[in-house]
């Protein structure tokens, strides 16, 4: 029993969680971008703009966008001249991303299927590592953070944006009601897939609170780990440096 992990509200083996998360994202890949707009009322675009403004990508620097999915964050960084490796465990999500990049004639992007827990990149390969709405889906989060630290150069920057449960009174109740009742229904109506969207909501609820996650970033070897809450703590940008 002891090595069971949560998949939403269920306890499963680590291998089963990775397999099921893979099935969720293969199932949602084609409608992922439209669903993001519907579920967040378009807000995810502003959060990603704010995130990239925080990363400050520089021309020709090498950035690993981990769990990069369909490329939303990577596109914003490539437009600023960074050379971005978009990596994700799910080839279906990356496939949709590659099509979108071609439609937009974007350059400076390369695509690689990778598990965040065990990267094939050599030590000190990247200037920055980004992971947006991805780490809560990873089965072994401390392993992913250690790998992030390993592949960064000295002075490299780590940035993660993730949902958290909001502490704002009133807003948190409203958000809970929206997340539990409305998001899975949108998933059913638009993508005929209520279960995947229920998982997405439950995975947000289970993700460590910002202070606990900040401590995990520090334990992986990053210095000056910080957590900047936005929108009543609903979304938090975490950062850290490798020295
Ligand atoms: N970063 C993109 C964005 O913000 O639009 C995609 C976020 S999507 C909610 C989460 C992504 O995490 C999925 O594409 C999923 O395949 C990926 N993922 C889940 N587990 C992973 C792992 N162990 N390694 C790499 N990617 C993983």
Image (cartoon, rainbow, N blue to C red):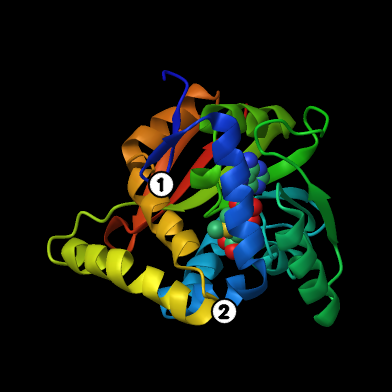
Q: Residue at x 46, y 73 (%)?
A: 187
Q: Mark 1 packing: few (<14 Cα in 10 Å), some, or many (20+)?
A: many
Q: Nearer the viewer, residue 10 or 159?
A: 10
Residue at 40 percent across and 60 percent down: it is: 198
Q: Quadrant of the N terminus?
A: top left
- Residue farthest along the top direction in this orientation: 2
Which numbered marker is on residue 57? none
Q: Which callout, 1 or 2, points at the residue further toward the start of the chain?
A: 1
For label 1, the residue is: 8
Number of labelled discs?
A: 2
Provide residue 128's location: percent of width, then percent of height. Answer: 68, 45
- Residue at 13% over, 66% down: 170
Q: Secondary structure at mark 1?
A: loop
Mark 2 Cα shell of 10 Å, populated few (<14), some (14-19), many (≥20): few
- Is residue 109 or residue 41 the one in the foreground? 41
Quadrant into which the C terminus falls? top right
- Figure check: 182 above or below 154: below
Return the residue nearer the eye: 59 or 128: 128
Determine whether the residue tagged by mark 2 lies in a helix, strand or loop: helix
- The residue that disc 2 covers is 34
Query: In which quarter of the view is residue 39 placed?
Result: bottom left
Foreground of the two, 212 or 225: 212
């Amino acid at each position: 029993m002891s090595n069971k992990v949560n998949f939403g509200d269920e306890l499963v083996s680590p291998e089963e969680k990775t397999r099921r998360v893979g099935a969720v994202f293969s199932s949602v890949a084609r409608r992922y971008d439209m669903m993001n707009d519907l579920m967040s009322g378009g807000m995810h675009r502003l959060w990603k703009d704010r995130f990239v403004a925080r990363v400050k990508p520089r021309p020709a620097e090498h950035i690993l966008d981990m769990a990069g999915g369909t490329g939303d964050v990577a596109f914003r960084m490539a437009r600023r001249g960074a050379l971005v490796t978009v990596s994700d465990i799910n080839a279906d999500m990356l496939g949709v991303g590659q099509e979108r990049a071609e439609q937009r004639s974007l350059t400076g992007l390369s695509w690689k299927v990778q598990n965040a827990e065990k990267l094939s990149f050599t030590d000190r390969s990247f200037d920055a590592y980004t992971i947006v709405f991805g780490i809560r889906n990873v089965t072994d989060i401390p392993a992913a953070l250690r790998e992030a630290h390993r592949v960064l150069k000295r002075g490299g920057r780590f940035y993660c944006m993730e949902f958290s449960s909001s502490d704002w009174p009133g807003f948190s109740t409203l958000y809970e009601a929206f997340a539990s009742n409305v998001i899975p229904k949108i998933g059913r109506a638009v993508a005929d897939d209520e279960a995947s969207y229920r998982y997405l909501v439950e995975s947000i609820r289970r993700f460590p609170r910002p202070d606990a996650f900040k401590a995990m970033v520090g334990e992986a070897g990053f210095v000056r780990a910080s957590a900047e809450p936005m929108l009543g703590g609903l979304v938090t940008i975490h950062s850290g440096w490798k020295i």
